[in-house]
Amino acid sequence: MIAVIDYRAGNAPSVGYALERLGLAHRLVAEPAGLGGVDRIVLPGVGAAGATLASLRDSGLVEPLRARVLDDGIPFLGICIGLQVLLDHSEEGDVAGLGWVPGRVRRFPDGLRVPQIGWNAVRPTRPHPVTDGLGRDAYCYFVNSYFAEPTDPADTLGVTEYGSDFASVIGRANIVATQFHAEKSGPVGLALLERFAHWDGTC
Amino acid sequence: MLTKRLIACFDVVNGRVTKAQQFQDNIDVAPAADLAQRLYEDQIDEIVFYDITASAEKRKIDLDTVRAVAHHVFVPFTVGGGIRTLDDMYEVLKAGAEKISIDSMAVRDPDLIRQGAEAFGRQCVVLSTQVKHQGVRPGLPSGYEVFIDGARLATGLDALDWVRRAEDLGAGEIVVNSIDRDGTATGYDLDVTRAVADAVNVPVIASGGAGTVAHIADGLTAGGAQAAIISSILYSPRFARNLGVRELKDALLDRGVPMRPYVADGA
């Protein structure tokens, strides 16, 4: 059973429809009790990092999520803002993140059209059970003005070029996260969701 | 690199796609959910759906059709028409849309743009604007005037002033919809599209008038747009021959326009 974290500014329904299409059992979870009995978690996200974090705190989800992901070690997938909140800090609103992956979130430099909106190529930088199969240049759908900069290069699983290369897939132990919207990246994204659903959380 | 996008646009009445010419004379095409599924399978980059009578009939948007489309479409999906409040936006997003398109209501209540961007993020708020070439005159420095309510009501607003203001308020994308070219298949209005692309820093979407591959290529190059809205060329019964998404993309790639390549073994 996959928990899809559902909060006001999120797009949990879209992720739910994608999992439904793949025939994967899931439920939308808006409160801590919903995290019991699930064996993996998807944290989708749109909007701003600060609003997402505030929404997770208001729902009392931060500590229960930490317990399931960091203590129990169940597989976790962050999507878009669900990736950006994993790092220590975001320049967007100058907010502290969850700090599950060391690093920062920075704004694209001036001179680029932001948000970056559209399909861009993801180039895997090291093998990983969730991203293996993406191929050399998988086009995925991005909507972002900010990007993650993990401290440890080994936490970057894939890169995408917008102005310069940025980390478009990150991962550490049982955590994996995509800056692109896997649930809105057509067959390529659906295939990634399916691999996540069968991942044992090791790499 | 970031590719250019082809966005299929549906004007929806009672759950069915219709096709108009210069905002009039609608003819029936197909159920929205069926057409959305077919275009998704053809690997369209994005879909936008306007509930074109919701606004005029002062009723809420057709959420059942939004849900039906969202169930079949795993590419971004924008919904517009009949959105008057933050709660309306929330309902549409919860029904499975990624973005909200606002047009006439944004002119009447520009703060709606700010409220939407604040609540859901700038990327959720698409400002669509209907523009008509009127010639340069006092108060209209670009020569293009903004219209609302299905191109029926002139606002006196200058197109470039309006899109700059909308960007400041929080619009994440701007659709430039040429009233003069809508449904005519004579090509996008490249002048106003380029002027808007130069005036704002958010992505700009060309709309109204694409009838050939060359028109689309022009909008995405000379017009400076990041995305092109197409409809007639894909499915209008008025066209002797409609083109498929793959055929369009291959032709655009041949012209050097960067597009998301077709995925051979699509799920």
Image: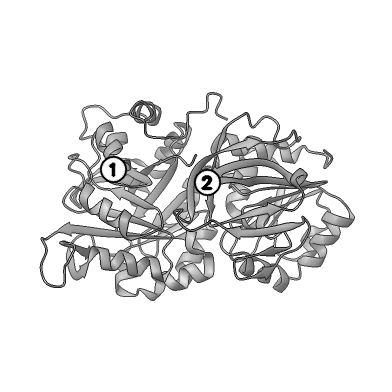
**Residue named by callout 2:** A162
Residue B157: quarter of image: bottom left
Q: Which of A88/A85 is in front?
A: A88
Residue B88: quarter of image: bottom left
The chain letter under disc 1 is B
Badge 1: how crowded within 10 Å, few (<14), some, or many (20+)?
Answer: many
Percent coordinates x, y for residue B106 in the rendering: 34, 69
- Coloring scheme of the render? one colour
Q: Which of B145/A37 is in front?
A: B145
**Residue named by callout 1:** B219
Q: Amino acid at mark 2?
A: Tyr
- For residue B94, say whether it is visible: yes
Q: Nearer the viewer, mark 1 or mark 2?
A: 2
Mark 1 to mark 2 CA distance (whole Å): 22 Å
**Relative to B174, is B223 on the left or the right?**
left
Q: Kindly give the residue lying farthest to the right in the view shown.
A: A71
Percent coordinates x, y for residue B221 in the rendering: 31, 41
Secondary structure beneath dot 2 equals strand
Q: Which mark is residue B27?
A: none
Q: Amino acid at mark 1?
A: Gly
The chain letter under disc 2 is A
Residue A60: quarter of image: bottom right
Percent coordinates x, y for residue B181 in the rendering: 18, 47
**Relative to B111, is A134 on the left or the right?**
right
Reply above or below: B142 against B197.
below
- Residue at point 41%, 55% (across, down): B79
Reply above or below: A3 against B256.
below
Reply above or below: A133 against A140.
above
Q: Do the dots labelled 1 and 2 sit on one chain?
A: no
